[in-house]
Amino acid sequence: MDATIENIVVSNRANLEVFSGTLQTLAQNDRDIIVVTSDSRGSGKLVPFGQKFPDQIVEVGIAEQNLVGVAAGLASAGKKVFAVSPACFLTARALEQIKNDVAYSNNAVKLIGISAGVSYGALGSTHHSLHDFAVLRTINNLMIIAPADNFETEQAIRLAAETDLPVYLRFGKKTMPLLSTEETTFEFGKGRTIKEGKDLVLIATGETVWPTLQAAEKLERESGIEATVISMHTIKPLDYDLIGRVAASGKPIITVEEHSIYGGLGEACASFLLENNYRNKFKIIGVPDEYTVTGSQQEIFDHYGISVEGITAAALKMGKG
Amino acid sequence: MSEQELAHKSVDYRKKILKYIFQANAGHTGGSLSCIDILNVLYNHVLNVDAADFASPDRDRYIQSKGHTVEALYVVLASKGFFPESDLETLCRYKSHYIGHPTRKVHGVEQNTGALGHGLSLSVGTAIAGKLDKKDYRVFTLLGDGELPEGSNWEAALSASHYKLDNLCAILDKNNLQITGATADVCNTDPVDKKFEAFGWEVRHVDGHDLKQLKETFDAIPFVKGKPSLVIAHTVKGKGVSYMENQLKWHHGVPTQQQYADALEELDLLDGNI
C-alpha cells in the first residue's frame, strides 16, 4: 500500500529521538551495547540512556578523533559500539580514524552522525555536513545509511547493532512523519519504493524523502503527473537493481538529497546510469557548491529547491520524458 | 627466558630485520632496530599471547602505533610461530600480505596501523572494554617520539587517565630522530615525562636496550594502581649496527650488499660476546 498523504501518520518524533529510544530498548537486554560520546549526549538525546545504563556509555569529551579510535578499540574487544557525534565533526575531523581504525581495520563501529546535513541551520557551515556522503563513499568497507522516517531509523539501528560490518548512519533532528505502513520491510542496500507512478522517478534520501513525497502528490493533483517515489536510505551499497529497473522505462529521474550536489546520491546514480547506457533525462537536487545561505533547515531547503515547490518545479520543467 | 637467551634473540632479530629489508629493498631500518629489544622483551617475557589461540578474549593486546617499524614486529611474530618466517620473503612484494605497515591480514597483528597517532586511542578503547568486562588482560602500545605531536595522542592520553586505565601501558621508543632531523628540532616534545605526568600518567624511564631493565620495568606495571603507565625507553636509532646508529639516513635507508655483509659480521661478533 502506498503511504499517501492521506494515510500518513504524523509521529511527531525526530529520527534522532527514535535512535536514542531504540538504543535504550536494545541496551536493556544487551550489555555489549556501548555508546561513545564526545560531549554529545545532550544533542544525541542520550541523557536518559546515560542515566539508565551508566556502564554502557563512554564519554571522551570534545575529541572526535579519540571518539572514533576508542570506539574502534572497544569494537575490537567485542562490543557493539555506537560512536555518536554531530555528523559535521564526526566525518571531517575524524575522517582518518574512520578510514583506518574502523573501515580498513574492519572494526564494526556504528558511526552515528547526528544533526546531519543542514539540521543546524543558521549555526552555519561549520556545523553542516554536506560532504559526508561524498567522502565516505570513497572509503571501502563502510555502509552509508540515511533513514527517511522513524520506521527506517528504528530498523536501521536494530540492523546496525547486529551487523559485524562498519556502518555510518546519519539523520537530523526534525520531527518526521511516518512514511511506512504495517507491511513495510527494511533492508540495508535495498531502496524502498514508497509510491509508484508511470511518468517520473523521484529518488530521495534521508529527510528529503518527505518533501519529495509531498511534491509527488502535488504533481499528481495539480498536473496529472504520476511519480514513483523511492527512499534510497542506503547510499552505499547503492541499490543498482532498483535504479536499473526504474530507469529501464525511460522515465525522467530526479534525485533529491540534503548534501552537496557533488559526490552524493545524485552523482552515484548518474555514474551508474551512464555506465549502463541509460539515457534518461536526469536532474540532481541538492545544495550547490557554496557555503549555504543563512537560515533554518527549512529555509535552506526552500532556498535551494530541496522542497515541495522546488522539486515540483524541476519535475514540470523535465516533463514526462 | 633468561637474559642471555633474550640477548641472543635480539641479535637474531636484528639480523632478520636487515635480511628482509635488504631483500625487499624497502623498510624502516633505524626505527626497527631501536624498538626491537622492547618487542623482544614484550613477546618473550611479558605478553600473554599464543599463536595457537590468538582469538582468545583474554589475551594481552599489543598495538603498534609506530606502524612503520613493522619489520621488527614481523620477525618477532614469525619467531613466536604466528606464521612461517619464509613468508617474509614476500615482504612488500606484489600481492603479498606482508605490507610495509601492520595489517590484520598477518596473523598476530591486532590493528591496522601506519598513520601516526592512532594506536593510543585504539588501546584506550580496548583497555576500557577490558575494565567493563572485568578481564585481566593488559593493553600495550608502542609510540614513536616523532608521532607525539599528533594531537590525537593527547586526546587519548586524557581519556586513559580519566578512565584510570591501569591495564594500559604505553611504551615510548625515544630514539630522538625522525625523518626530517632531531625530534627536538622538528617539534620538541620534551620534557615528555612531565607532560604525561601532567596528563595523569605514571612514568618510568628505562634504557630501551637493557633487557634486564626492560624486564624489571614491565614486571612492575601498573606502576600505580588506577593510573596508566608510560615507559619511556631511551633508545638509539639503528642500534646494533655501528654505521647506522644515530644516523638520520637510516630512517628508511636500505643497506647495499656490502653494507649488509658488514652489518651481519658486526652482529655475529656481538652474538659471540654474549
Image (cartoon, coloured by chain):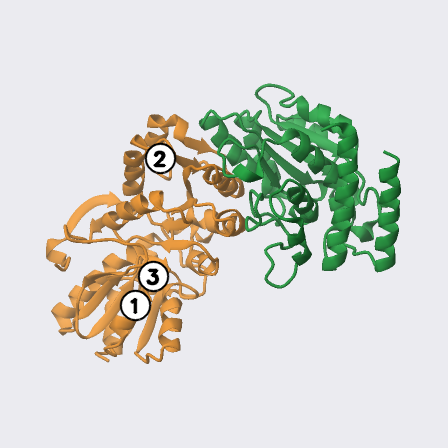
Chain colours: A orange, B green
Q: Residue at x 57, y 21 (%)?
A: B226
Q: Name the residue at 62% across, 64% down.
A: B94
B71 is higher (above) or lower (below) than A41: below
Give me the chain letter of mark 1.
Answer: A
User: Which of marks 1 and 3 precedes in the sequence?
Assistant: 1
Which residue is denoted by mark 3 in the rendering?
Answer: A257
Judge whether B217 appears above or below B31 on screen.
above
Of marks 3 and 1, the one in the foreground = 1
Q: Chain of mark 3?
A: A
Residue A46 drawn at (x, y percent):
35, 35
Is residue A308 something that shows in the picture? Answer: no
Amino acid type for the residue under numbered disc 3: Glu
Local crowd size for mark 3, using a 10 Å CA cut-off: few (<14), some (14–19), many (≥20): many
Farthest-out residue, left:
A6
> Which of the 4 quarters of the picture holds residue A260?
bottom left
Badge 3 and badge 2 in a common chain: yes
On the image, numbered disc 1 is attached to which residue?
A241
B157 is higher (above) or lower (below) than B33: above
Please provide percent x and percent y for residue A141. 45, 55
Q: Quadrant of the N terminus of chain B?
A: top right
- Check if mark 2's residue and mark 1's residue have beta carbons within 8 Å: no
Residue located beneath label 2 in the image: A46
Residue A80 is left or right of residue A69, and the answer is left
Q: Earlier in the sequence, mark 3 or mark 2?
A: 2
Camera sees residue A202: yes
